[in-house]
Amino acid sequence: MRRLFLLTLLVCGLAVPAAAPAAPGDGTLSVRDGDGRVHLLDLRGALVGRIDHGVLEVQVSKAADCDELAVWGAEDERLRSRRTEFGTETICVFSGKRAMRFRLTGSLVSVLVRGKDIDLSVVGKGGLMIRGAGNADGAYSVNGSAYASLPEDSSWELLGTTAPARLVP
């Protein structure tokens, strides 16, 4: 009887965690030769990119954080503050008409990339919005999907995947 009780307890103990939904896993975003804008919100991961002509805006917690961002080739760097209902946001703005490269890692509140010839690779979790500039505006892939032209209408997507819950027999 004692063995049956322990076996039942063990099976129930394993079934409960297995039935719980899994946390979202890392997703991917790839943009090739994009013309338009890519907006990432609440990104937790890594982003490597290049813009031939455009603007990179990164929201940071304090002004000193702008100096720590890995951005190369920007012709203009400035700090912008914006008041919201939640307080003041500090945004580092990098722009240029020549190739600008950047590498951002960690937990980022908001990253906006807009311009011409955007090449971007992102791995992590968060929300994203992509909008193309028109006809031949490049291609993108989210979470390993097939490449498609950048959409003309903005729509939010989730970067990352969730594993379906399953019961252990």
Image (cartoon, rainbow, N blue to C red):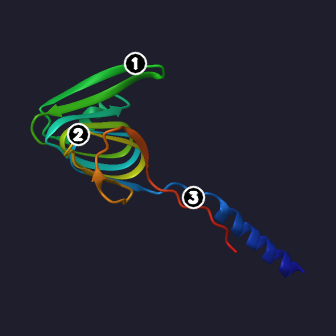
Label 2 vs label 3, nearer the camera: 2
Residue 70 % position (x, y): 23, 43
Measure how far apart labels 2 and 3 are at the Cα level.
38 Å
Q: Is residue 30 visible?
A: no
Q: Is 27 placed left or right of 141 in the picture? A: right
Q: Write down the residue under mark 1.
A: 83
Give the mark nearer the N terminus: 3 vs 1: 3
User: Which SS class for mark 3?
Assistant: loop
**Amino acid type indicated by mark 1:** Arg
- Is residue 110 visible in the rendered structure shown here? yes
Say whether disc 2 or disc 3 marks the residue closer to the N-terminus. Answer: 3
| Extreme residue in the right direction | 1
Three-letter residue code for mark 3: Ala
Circle 1: element type: strand
Q: Residue at x 13, y 33 (%)?
A: 96
Q: What is the quadrant of residue 9 in the picture?
A: bottom right
- The residue that label 2 is drawn on is 134
